[in-house]
Image (cartoon, helix red, strand yellow):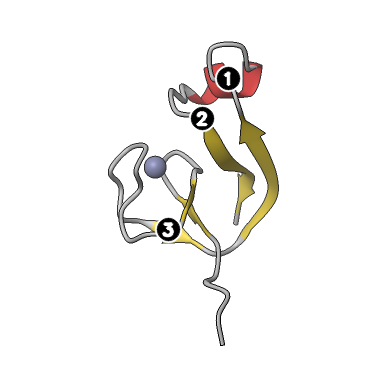
Amino acid sequence: MGGSKEKACRNCKRIVQGDVCDNCGSTSFTTTFSGLIIIIDPEKSEFAKELKLKKAGAYAVKLG
Ligand SMILES: [Zn+2]
């Protein structure tokens, strides 16, 4: 067994393991997403700025 399925927050695209997005608090997720980007320094990432991400972590590039 094992291997929790990765899911992405529909609101901010963050890859979330629990039941609540720890970035925006959303509980709406999708397991259908493509691309994965790791934000290490949100302040310096164009992608983070574009999505207004303030937290480092993994995010899906595209949902659906
Ligand atoms: Zn979120």
**Cα distance, mark 1 to mark 3?**
24 Å
Which label sits in the foreground, 3 or 2?
2
Q: Quadrant of the N terminus?
A: bottom right
Label 2 environment density (alpha carbons within 10 Å; few <14, some 14–19, many ≥20) = some
Name which of mark 3 and mark 2 comes first in the sequence: 3
Secondary structure type for disc 3: strand
Secondary structure type for disc 1: loop
Secondary structure type for disc 2: loop
Front residue of this view, candidates 32 and 2:
2
Which residue shows up at 60% across the image and 57% down it?
A: 64
Left or right: residue 45 versus residue 35 is left
Ligand 1's quadrant is top left
The residue indicated by pointer 1 is 41
Q: Residue furthest bottom?
A: 1
Name which of mark 1 and mark 3 comes first in the sequence: 3
Front residue of this view, candidates 48 and 18:
18
Which residue shows up at 60% across the image and 26% down it?
A: 40
Q: Is residue 26 above or below residue 38?
A: below
| Marker disc for residue 53 | none
The residue indicated by pointer 3 is 29
The residue indicated by pointer 2 is 56
Q: Amino acid at mark 1?
A: Asp
Q: Amino acid at mark 2?
A: Ala
